Image (cartoon, rainbow, N blue to C red):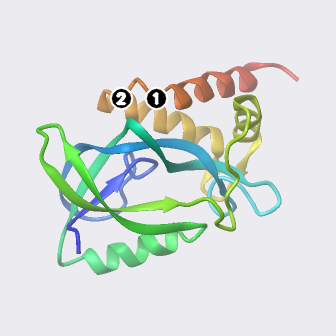
Amino acid sequence: MPEWLFAYGSLIWRPDFRYLERRRAALPDHVRQFWQGSHDHRGTPEAPGRVVTLVPARGRRCLGMAYRLDPVTRTAVLDALDHREKNGYERRAVTLFDDSGAALEALVYVAAPGNFAWLGEAPPEAIAAQIASSRGPSGRNAEYLHELVGALARLGAEDDDHLLALDGAVRGLLETPG
């Protein structure tokens, strides 16, 4: 079983598990998109929010954080993450590359098309409006987006056009009176 876990969403800025090491890493041929519904964290069943998942994209890469799991706590960490990511995500094995070019065998949680919470592609304005208006037990959906954009900027990943466009649109909606 891979010893690394790849984080491309909220686990970048808020890993709530024990790890031995972390490295900036990228998953080739994938991008992060706000195409997964969140009924249990950043929205509700009646008004789901939107969170990121990985989507294949040849020639692109998704930058994130790789965490080397502690063998002593690995099972407990994965059990907790399986519960946390129960809203349509599945665990997969992937090969990442750190900044030195070293390959890391890792696990990642991905929400695939067709899962019960899948929202899929939509016009950016519609995604932004949904994010701006959604709130769930873990807080405002806009907070998730803003935290992710900030975490990626700290990693030096400022080339994620999808996230940057959504961030600007959501900030504009939240600043607009009425």
Q: Quadrant of the N terminus?
A: bottom left
Q: Position of residue 146 (x, y in %)?
A: 54, 33
Left or right of 89 on screen, residue 47: right
The residue positioned 63% from the left and 38% from the top of the image is: 142
The residue positioned 67% from the left and 49% from the top of the image is: 120
Identify the amino acid type marked 1. Asp
- Please say if 71 is above or below 27: below
Within 10 Å of disc 1 (Cα), the crowding (few <14, some 14-19, many 20+) is some
Left or right of 104 on screen, residue 49: right
Q: Farthest residue to the right: give it.
A: 178
The residue positioned 46% from the left and 29% from the top of the image is: 160
Q: Position of residue 163 (x, y in %)?
A: 54, 31
- Please say if 25 is above or below 81: above
Residue 149 vs residue 107, the one in the foreground: 107
Left or right of 173 on screen, residue 70: left
Q: Farthest residue to the front: give it.
A: 58
Q: Position of residue 22 (x, y in %)?
A: 20, 50
Q: Which mark is residue 74?
A: none
Q: Which mark is residue 157?
A: 2
Q: Position of residue 141 (x, y in %)?
A: 64, 44
Q: Are marks 2 and 1 in contact (CB under 8 Å)?
A: yes
According to the picture, the residue beneath numbered tag 1 turns out to be 160
Identify the amino acid type marked 2. Ala
